[in-house]
Amino acid sequence: MQALVFGRKSRLGELKRTMGELTPELRPVLGRALGEANAQVNQALTVQRESIREREARELLERERLDVTLPGRGRRHGHRHLITRVTQEFCDVFIGMGYRIAEGPEVETEFYNFEALNIPSNHPSRSEMDTVYVERQGTEGEVASGSGGQVLLRTHTSPVQVHLMQNAQPPLYYLVPGRAFRKDTLDATHAAQFHQIEGLAVDRNITFGDLAGTLEAFIREYLGESFKIRLRPSFFPFTEPSAEVDVWWNDRWLEILGCGMVDPNVLEAVGYDPQVWQGFAFGVGVERIAMLRYGLDDIRLLYDNDIRFLAQF
Amino acid sequence: MKVSLSWLKELVPGLSLESETDIAALCEILNDRGLVVEELRRPSALEHVVVGEVKECLPIEGAKSVQLVHVDDGDGTREVVCGAFNFGPGDKVPLAKPGAKLPNGMEIAVREIKSLGVTSHGMLCAADELGLGEDHSGIVILAPESKIGSSVAQILGLDEAVVELEITPNRPDCMGMIGVAREVAAAKSASVQLPDFDISESTPAVQDLATVTIADADGCPRYVAMVVEDLTIGPSPAWLARRLRASGMRPINNIVDITNYIMLLWGQPLHAFDLDNLAGPSINVRRGLPDEKMTTLDDVERELSEQDLLICDATQPVAIAGVIGGQSSEVSPTTTRVLIESAHFDPESVMATAKRLGIRTESSARFERGVDPGNCDTAARHAAQLMAELGDGNVRAGIIDVKAKTISQPQTVGLRAERVNRLLGIDLTTSQVVGLLAPIGIGQVSKSESEIVDSNTPVALQFQIPSWRQYDLTREIDLIEEVGRCFGYNNIVRTLPASGERVGGLTPEQLTERKVRSALLASGLDEAQTTSFVSDALYDKLGWVDMPRVRLVNPIRDEECYLRTSLVPTLLDAAAYNVARNASTVCLAEIGSVVSPSPEAKANGDGLPNEKRVIGAVMCGVDAATPVHGDDQARPFDIYDIKGALEGIAKDLAITLDFATAQVPVPGIHPARTGDVVLAGIKIGWFGQLHPDQAKAFDLPISTVVAEIELDPLIRAHLSLDDSYRKISPHQATFFDVALEVDEGVEAGSLRSLLQGHAGPLCQSLELFDVFKGDPLPKGKKSLAFQFKFQAPDRTLTDEDVRPVIDNMVQVATQDFGARLRSG
């Protein structure tokens, strides 16, 4: 191509050879003209070459085309259990309100699970109908005085409250998540093993209004701004005043948790002066919240460990 | 507690219950007062359900469980097929005629039962079918004077609204209509209209007819008895039967019904004894004797204990105090003289006996919570008056009122308005506090009377606690709750605690735990939540026959009588659940608590087992790859998959886990494919492939691998790291490959540890990158190829820096493992 255009036998070459035949005056004129022609041709050639290269590159890449709709190269991916997810979400809202998280053992003594929480020794919840007891370790069957009584599976995460208060001075703002056990038979809404989150705030001037406001703030943050709650007077041995909290859900009030101001007896049991310190506590079932938040209709789904369920979260 | 609204209105005349809105407002009041409305039963006309009179009951050939009943419905006799047999000719029964629609949705039509050759022209109804509770034991028998053809709804009180309240254990007063009325009246600023009754008494005096002695004053502080004679036992009048029905009780006869009515009204359980069947006639309240027995009203012979409080006549027990009456002195159709018992029994004693005997009655439910001890006489008088009126009897003069122990002393409790405000977050004046408490009977003691003033609370107001609340209201905090309740929980302004100086957040340990959880997910493990309870069968299936266990005293299910000591067995169960549902890949992990027996350490201690948190994992089936890309075929899991998951945790936590051939293989695990997981020289867990026998037992694929390691040592190791930044060397790294020929039995990990130990400070990393067996290596030999990375912070390394280190390592490897250098 180069030779064809610029070579000796080319048209431009021929013109170049005629240069000698021209007058000295005309030679530069022809020289300039030839130079311009050369440049133009070169330019055209460059453009052409470039375009060919581009086309070839394009064609090459086109031949390498992949079907983007084929699946990605798989990596197995695990899923967080809904109980963990809800627990973390719940805790995170309260962390935002200045709370810390505490955990404790699932096997407890009567002292921590009942006595320190002002639950009398004849209270029905302490019966073998309601509480699962564990064989004592060490000395066979005997309960040494001051040892905390029988060994049991905690029926709520409240014993952690007591440990906390025994080991720290107020103010305390804590959330206590964990597994708890009651002798319920498993059905769509009850499980013998369930997860509870207990909240505890102890300070100098914390009020019942603060309790209601905190729970309302949580519900709005977690379920949505439009959700409303109401409090109903209730009775628990470890709080006074006590309340049940309902949330307006699908056109009716649905009970979601129990709460109240920490009973002075509980404060005294851990050595706090109830004239100085006061606080609130609440306990909520994680399963209950999971059912509300994620529309679950059967609690058993949470314990079947069916991967078709697990993989949804 | 079922509350008939018409009855409630009778007690609170100011109450308006005309419209749906009124009823909804009432429900709101009840909820706000802590009397939770569990259910609102709206009035039901029960059209086409009428009083029928049974004329004849005929057997149907070929059918034993049903009979053909001829019923007169007022317009004529019709044939109805019925599956109950608790009635006979002459009984008045509810008849649902074709066209009726029952509360449970059942629509009644003429039904031809071809197989029996009969046609049923309606249905006779049991209580549950009419929307009256759950009783399905038989057809409802209506009062004999019920007019044939008239509306059943009216007779049974179904045509009025009833709310069912859940009463908390601290409110025994609201186990009676008057208590509920008191709350409603207080909320509506109305007043309670207490029943007004006149009683006319005649000689002889009751003291001449019976005697009462209390041998156990703690169990029975007060016993009131009255006698009514010349009674005629019969059915209760319609208004009474209707009220009992509305309250969920079955009318029996006028006397028994009156005792129940008084209980529903006043909250005071009563018992009526047939005076002619009381030996003495005397009442002695005492504890049971050894081997004592009695037959109770429900026709069950009960073995009594020395803890049970009993009502006895001169010879034998005639009732279990506060729980249930005895058969021997039961009011029967021939009874003419009764002794009315209106007593106060100790709540704990009644609770213990009711629990021991497994009997829960309307009576025990009330006594357990603490009945008003100040009201025994009123309840008895009212009952006597009604018996005289409805049973045509004569009330004998006076009452026996034995007060064995004072329990109803005037009780005052101090309350500071400042405390109320500080605890509730409201701003009430003293007079507002007084004004809130007065309507529920908690009155301020006038200044002159209130001498008991707590020294450090000089401004405390003193309040008189009414007898019906004396078990509940004993402390200042109890009154604060009452103020809050009467003020309205939902009227308290909702605030947030002042933020103060606190900072919320997770502890370093909790943050690390979340990291571990994420690492498990990143390794493709779905998080599971398995049961804490395990059975012998499960452990046996895994071959864990001798594994130490922690036993439950009273398991929920008998076979699941241990607390889990490992997450592996239940995770295997969970995997099997999924495999049984055709899952080809199941990867599960759980972080949870497990226990182990603590035999020695805690003897004489708290008796608790050791408890720790562990990570359990199971992978089974095939690694579901994306075969469409050809290069990654699905592959059965092996131990390196689960080991990789553990290494993934270690990487995320920047800690080093070591893996060594298991010293003592875990039972149920492939003995040649299991290893210990070691952290800083201490075993913290294990991993391995499920033994083929166990895989079979669990119905799991052979390619099932498991692991379990302790969580807390990982967290501690992570938190003890120096986590400050390490400078990146600007100088080039030198890479050096060494291939060593060793006996096949040499563990790569051991050789690697040895090399690592002699690699010197310049060695940045050491990776095994090739394992090779076979030609040209001699039989029984293998080649392990390692890549070393050397780098110095201050210079580029040369061959002279590295070569002596390599030579030394090879020499050591030759000495210790008989290694031969193949290349390097």
Image (cartoon, coloured by chain):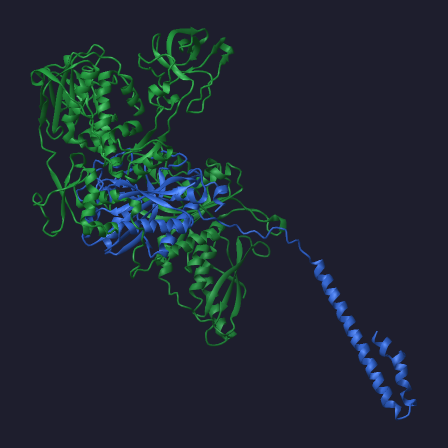
Chain colours: A blue, B green
* Left or right relative to A92: residue B207: left
Residue under the image location 45 percent in, 48 percent down: A80
Q: Which residue is at a point 47% across and 65% down the rendered structure image?
A: B765
Query: Is residue A197 depicted above or below B324 in this figure?
Result: below
- Give the total of numbered labels: 0
What x and y, as percent, mark residue B620? 50, 43
Closest to the observer, A7 or B631: A7
User: Considering the image in quadrants, where does the N terminus of chain A appear?
Assistant: bottom right
Residue B420 x/y as whole percent: 21, 49
Q: Can residue A287 be seen in this view?
A: no
Q: In which quarter of the image is residue B21?
A: top left
Identity of the residue furthest to the bottom in this view: A24
Q: Is residue B575 left or right of residue B719?
A: right
- The residue positioned 49% from the left and 14% from the top of the image is B111
Between B502 and A207, the one lying in front of the other is A207
Camera sees residue B618: yes
Residue B208, image quadrant? top left
Q: Measured from the top left, where is residue A180 in percent x and y? A: 33, 42
Q: Which residue lies furthest to the right in this view?
A: A21
x and y percentages locating residue B490 in the rendered image: 31, 45
Quadrant position of residue B543? top left
Decide: is B100 above or below B547.
above
Image height of A6 relative to B239, above or below: below
- The foreground one among A94 and A260 is A260
